[in-house]
Each structure stands twice: as structure tokens, then as C-alpha cells.
Amino acid sequence: MTRYGRPIAPMRYQTPPIGARVPAITRDIFRKRGFSQSHILAHWPAIIGEALAEYCSPEKLAFPRTPNEGRGPQGSATLTVRVDGPIALEIRHLEPQIVERINGYYGYTAVARLKLVQGPLPPRPKSRRRKFRPLTQGERDALVRSLDPIGEPALKSALERLGQRILGTSARLPDSRARATQRFD
């Protein structure tokens, strides 16, 4: 038994979550590119801002061969950034502010300068959020009428939101919308 009163065997032989194994698997890949941790890659939009992160991504972190007097692990590094298209000129112009943001985020002089490489960026994952159209007045009235018998306000508002999402889904065909509103009558 552990000191918390749980048996040891179920904890020892339990399968760990897949997410717990990802850092161990990707560690060697990131080290080849100079990243001792994947933190800068995962938090790039938070570090430099969403607007700039759309057009650039960190590619490699190169430390100097001989450590200088920087406070970082091996001195200040050069961050290679892949830049998409003509925004490279603006990023070159904003280099001091970007380096300051990175160093301010980490709390020490982690990056001394940027090296820009022009090329296409990997495609961004598509947003999984669905877009819903606003309901017509007839659809809204039919929905409200169908929910009148429900007395509990919290349940009624939850069902109303659900009905708005179902009826407002853009993937439905116009004739199926008509059938859906007829069911509420």
C-alpha cells in the first residue's frame, strides 16, 4: 500500500496516457534542431503575437561554439525563422522587438539575433469551429413554441441554444431545414 492508502499494483501496471510519452519520443528530433525543449515551438504565437506567427515559424536554434557571457545555458543563440513571402522585410525591421519579446518571455537572454529563411510554411490546421447562420423569425418562433411546455428555465435555455445550433448548421440542405421546422410545429 502507498501512503495514500492505494494499492501499488494497479498504479504500477496502469497504461500511461499517450500525451505523457510524446515529449520522450520527440526529444531527439527537437535536439537535432537545437531545441532542448519544444516550448518555443508550442508557444510561438503567444511569444511573438498571433499576427506575426501566421507568417513565420521557428526552425532551428543554434548556440555559439564557445559560450559567451550571456546568462542563458550556453550563451545567446541564433534563432532561424522560416518566413513566408515578402513579410521577411517587415520581420527583419521588427527583429529587435521580436528578440526582446522572446527574451522577455523566457526571462534571460536566450536569443541574440534572428536568421531569416524564406520559404513556404507548413499548412495551418483548419479551425474545427462550426459556423452557424442566424435563424429566421419563423424558425425562431417555431423553436420557442416547441419549448413552451418546459418549466425549468436552465433546461429551457440549454435546449433553445441546442435548437439554434441544430437549425443554424450550414451543412443542412434547405429542404431538410424546412422539414426540421415542421417537426417543431
Image (cartoon, grey):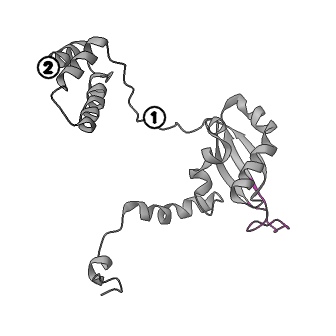
What residue is shown with label 1? 126
Relative to 141, residue 104 above or below: below
Which mark is drawn over residue 169? none
Residue at 68% across, 30% down = 85
Q: Position of residue 103 (x, y in %)?
A: 74, 55
What residue is shown with label 2? 183
Q: Main secondary structure of the magenta part?
A: loop
Q: Residues in magenta? A: 63-78
Label 2 crowd (10 A; few <14 / some 14-19 / many >=20): few
Q: To which quarter of the image does residue 2 belong?
A: bottom left
Which is more toward the observer, 125 or 179?
179
- Specify which label sits upstream in the sequence, 1 or 2: 1
Which is more toward the observer, 46 or 182?
182
The quarter in which the C terminus is drawn is top left
What's the amino acid at mark 2? Arg
Q: How many marks?
A: 2
Instruction: Judge from the rendering whether residue 38 lies leftward or rightward of residue 81; answer left or right.
Output: left
Q: Position of residue 36 (x, y in %)?
A: 62, 63
Q: Position of residue 34 (x, y in %)?
A: 66, 59
Q: Position of residue 96 (x, y in %)?
A: 81, 45
Residue at 51% across, 37% down = 124
- Residue 152 belongs to magenta span: no
What's the amino acid at mark 1? Lys
